[in-house]
Image: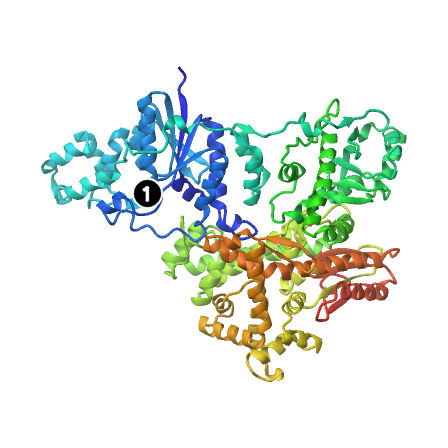
Amino acid sequence: MTQKRLLLIDGHSMAFRAFYALPAENFSTSGGQHTNAVYGFLSMLANILAEEKPDHAAVAFDVGRKTFRTEMFPDYKAQREASPEEFKGQVPIIEDVLGDLGIVTLSKENYEADDIIATLTTQAKASGDFETIIVTGDRDYLQLVDGSTTVLYPTKGVSVLTRFTPEAVEKKYDLTPAQYPDFAALRGDPSDNLPNIPGVGEKTATKWIKQYGDLENLLNHAEEIKGKVGNNLRERIDQVRLNRQLTQMVTDMELPVDPEGLDMKPVDVGTVAVAFDKLEFGVNLRERVLAAVETTGALTEESVELADLTVDQGPLDEWLHARSGQGLAVYVLGNSAPFQGDASAIGIVDKQRHGISKELADLSAEEDKALGQWLESEDPKYLHEAKATYHMLKGRGIELRGIAHDTAIAAYLLRPGQRTYELSDVYQRHLQRQLAEPSQQMSLMGDTSLVDSAAAILELAEELTVQLKEIDAIELYQDLEIPLLTILARMEHTGIAVDLAVLEDQLQVFTDQTTQVEAEARQLVDEPELNLSSPKQLSVVLFDKLDLPKTKKTKTGYSTAAKEIEALAVKNPHPFLDKLLSHREYQKMKSTLEGLIKTVQSDGRIHTTFNQTVASTGRLSSTEPNLQNIPVRTDAGKKIRSSFVVGEGYECLLTADYSQIEMRVMAHLSQDAGLVEAYKDGEDLHNYVGSKVFDVPIDQVTPELRRRVKAMSYGLVYGLSAFGLSQQLSISPGEAKGIMESYFDRFGGVKRYLDDVVDQARKDGYTSTVFGRRRYLPELNSDNRVARENAERAALNAPIQGTAADIIKVAMIRVDKAMQGMKSRVLLQVHDELVVEIAPGELDQVQVIVEREMDKAITLRVPLEVSAGAGKNWDEAAH
């Protein structure tokens, strides 16, 4: 009879390993719940399920610190620090997802996870029906290893696991698994706070256990051990016996289930998809997990939802002609990079579920002409990621028009913050159905996946329209986001000209400065081989050699992250820290320049991609390259901006931006009489606020007072605390608290607004911009303090930043419409700024248009202020 395979995982142990293997700051929901431990745990689980293929599985968790062992020995594990705040709240999420995956989770008051696993392992062994695999970061489990039980122990994060069989245990420790707990009791265990015997290390402990066979026999012959170590052993016999008791796992607990009851149930794909969406994990991890388990609810290409789809044959021109003026769903295959796009195949479906697909290379002249005319017509087209389709078709000389739907944008407005909006993902998320998207290589002979994808877009367009109406976001979708995407596509295709020589000169400057400052830093600490990019080497220099105060503790030592080093430099100035911070700044600029140079295309222009579905607040982001991370005010940033120049055949660049747009939105939303009055009277806001807060005449607001007020005014939009303000301004928390209290005394409307917006969001579950853009924040009601506070900060920020983002989007649409028929063109939108390439003789007219349309984008309780400037390059055009 074939043995069944039982997988047992020590949940807390592996969750902790996962937490420290992945940076917490890189994994969190848009509402602020950290998810790095969840992500790492599930990634590890997917690998193990795929490789070990268990039939039965369970994950055991500790309940708390208090167990029968702490009653026997109060110092047991007492040295362990409290879990990091970012870790808290992640274990319940792991337990929930395991429940969705049909994997049993177990825990019991007064016992540890290892007792549960030891009991199940013992039961499995007794039945003779199971081969058991235990996954843990605790070496005490090695005592369970035998012919039918293997331990997988992580040696690198949670991705590399070492397999401990009886032979592997003996090879590693020169002891049998049964002897391991005896060895551990002798050696002591710092991780469990079990005392050691002075002078007895691993070698001595191993030698004694091998010589006497087991611990009890050794202790019975303790008088035979010579020298000081013998005395030390004899003095601590009671402690060693206690160590042995504490190390011994319980193998006969009463549990609600036995190994037979741990069989893995089929997993519902829809349930898992919803869970992963809530965590904002990408499709890749979800598919890896689902591929490793038996699933139910997964629909194939032949499934019922596509049963009424008819795939037509025949000439494409006739098919299109018969559907002239109708709304059709389109799916195009090809390369979607701006300026490099190309299309290879197309699938089209009508509302009667008739579809057709064609390889573009095989089209006849009549078909090719008809397709081009239809794509360039205003006939309604339903697409997914329409901007990408625009670039594919542009490569064939076709200007896509008539975009009526983009189901990626619709899905984003309904659920902002998801990691991916790929068609198959959105189809699963909103219609609970699976879709096999076509690959670039597949032949169309007998293949319906292009038509299936177009049909999926049609279904989504219908369903998501209903959902957008339910949340009053249909106008935001139809009047703002859909018109904007064509404008962005044209901007991406046009690109912006760059002076490559300026970029290369700058790169050389920063390369030289990086090398020089590293050499100076090495000299300061007399470390000729020091690598300033190595956290391990830095840690030794900072905290051992220079004896600087320790930063936040991490799994591998003390943090050398930028934020920690900056704070250290403020409180403990040191020339080495200055060099280190300079080195990091130069490295960052060097990377930025390398990225820019790499992306210059054959036309001498950079074609960035503007993302409409990335930032949860509605802001556009920029990638390949990211033009938003070029510093605005530093000399280095200005030099880089000077490399962005006016293109051939054009006269100059015009830049225009909103002044203090977020503060104006804050004044509008809070209706604070003081702020509204300041803006209406045309006062310098920060001077005005400074005079009120510090009770001095406006002309006596010093640059330092202005700096403090400015930091606080903008900080409030991001949920800045008094402590945060004190850190930012290098003043005492008490002084910072006083400034904030004085501010709120003078500007009570702001305080009321900030309180009310969080309370309302907590009730509703979301925030909303003036234009109705929602940001969902379920973490506002989380029991996890870190997640809740992060969500509160997001709730303060989202309506303000989101409204500001919507305003500039409206402005772009208005500017585009007003500039119809002109040769000048908008090239970039970066933060609150537009960059326009001006054709000869059009500067004055375009400047009037841009300033007027940006000003009229919205009517607030306070006036908007637009400033513009022109020059031969982006820096020169600054104002």
Mark 1 sits on what residue?
109
Q: Residue at x 55, y 61 (%)?
A: 759
- Screen quadrant of the N terminus: top left
- Which of 24 and 232 lies nearest the eye of the viewer? 24
Q: Is residue 847 above or below residue 530?
A: below
Colour scheme: rainbow
Q: Is residue 681 visible?
A: yes
Q: Is residue 689 above or below residue 66?
A: below
In the displayed structure, would residue 87 be above or below residue 870?
A: above
Place residue 129 in its image quadrant: top left
Quarter assignment of residue 216? top left
Q: Residue furthest top?
A: 1
Q: Quadrant of residue 196?
A: top left
Q: Could you say where residue 347 lies in the image, as x and y percent from the top left? A: 77, 32
| Residue 232 placement (x, y as % from top left) | 15, 44
| Three-letter code for the amino acid on which mark 1 is drawn | Glu
Taking the image as shown, residue 611 lies to the left or right of residue 732, namely: right
| Residue 643 visible from this viewpoint | no
Q: Is residue 303 left or right of residue 738?
A: right
Residue plotted at (32% across, 40% down):
112
Using the image as rendered, state which of residue 149 and residue 163 is in the foreground.
149
Pick the residue in front: 485 or 572: 485
Q: Residue at x 38, y 57 (%)?
A: 543
